[in-house]
Amino acid sequence: MKLRPLPAVIALLLSACSTPNQVNVQIDTHSVVKTKQQSNKTPIYKNLYPGKKNYPITCQENCYPPTTKIKCEAPMESCSYIGDNPSIGLATGFEVHWFGHAGFKVTTPDNSQILIDPVSDQFDWPVNWAFSLIGGNNRAPVKWLDDSELKKTDAVLYSHIHYDHFNKDDITRIGSQVHYLVPLGFAKHFANNGFQINEMAWYSKKAIKHTQVHFVPAHHFSSRIQVPFIYNDDDQTLWGGWLLEHSGHTLFFAGDTGYSKHFKDIQQKYGDIDICLLPIASYYHPEYGDWYRYVHTTPEDALTAARDLNCKVMIPWGYGNHSWKMGDHSSHSALFRLLHMQQKMQYPNDVYIMNEGETINL
């Protein structure tokens, strides 16, 4: 009897126990795909507007003044927003629940439940293991959905493959009975378990009940360790944001992004945006200089983007007690800076500040 090599046996057993995923690659007539061909390698994706950035405004000094609107247990650490929020009278029918970091649950006007970048716990292996060795990048656990709430989910949207936005443990819990809308090249990061996956190019769209879900550009990058020390998926998977449209009302989630002309492009294509979920953190790191800001918006960049989009209400995210401090000064330093720059820039539209776990009807 000839014995199979052990890896082949394991692969055979895994294939026998798996169910192929249903993957649809969607590139619509007006979609945009920008790639760079590598010799003998998979093409890599590129930003629409690469190169040196000229930012309209930058806070130079005294960027984190104290405020009575934020209550903290330590300087800019372990905080809650206690200030007044504006009364929002948009009547869009969207309900927004913030888990923390970049994770949201959005209930649409037709009662679809859509999860955006849901990450319930720490990073996936091996990154969680690596950070545990150095004692960093842990976060307080978020209040997550129970099984009965998860079963109400119609679709899950992921903006990119970075560990703080996509956790494989979560898709196992959410299951294969929902639609997964993801960027191009993303499906290979799912285990074969019968998942319904729609890979999308920029400016492609898919209907979830009566809500049109558009995948739109962001200015970022992608990388994810597939095999430690051997293989990284460097920019072989696209990144972007999501725009939900229902009965003439719009909700925009920017994803991780730096500031670029793509915000104006989105406004020109879809018109003024009702609700903008915009990142304001992870822009500072003393070791990496300007690069962090190149791929993440500062609070003033986010306010500039909100002006470009003509957001009727801006809801910031990325700060907080349940976020990973990715080079930020503290858990809430970005929020302190946002409140300061909102006043300094005389930002004219509404900014609604949420604490993690809160829900707002808009």
Image: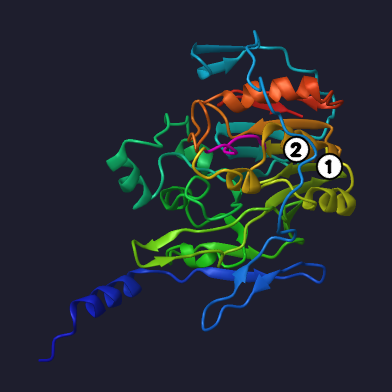
Q: Residue furthest bottom?
A: 1
Residue 159, above or below 5: above
Q: Amino acid at mark 2?
A: Cys
Structural distance between the alpha carbons of marks 1 and 2: 8 Å
In the picture provided, is 213 more to the left or to the right than 64? right
Q: Residue at x 79, y 18 (%)?
A: 86
Q: Residue at x 46, y 49 (%)?
A: 167
In the picture provided, is 67 more to the left or to the right than 148? right
Mark 1 neighbour density, 10 Å: few (under 14) some (14–19) many (20 or more) = many
Residue 154, above or below 318: below
Residues at discs 1 and 2 in contact (Cβ within 8 Å) = yes
Quadrant in which the C terminus is drawn: top right
Give the total of numbered labels.
2
Expressed as whole percent of the image width and height from the top left, the position of residue 35 reads 66, 71
Which of the labelled discs sits on residue 309, or is there none? Answer: 1
- The stretch of residues the image draws in magenta is 279-285
Q: Residue at x 65, y 48 (%)?
A: 294
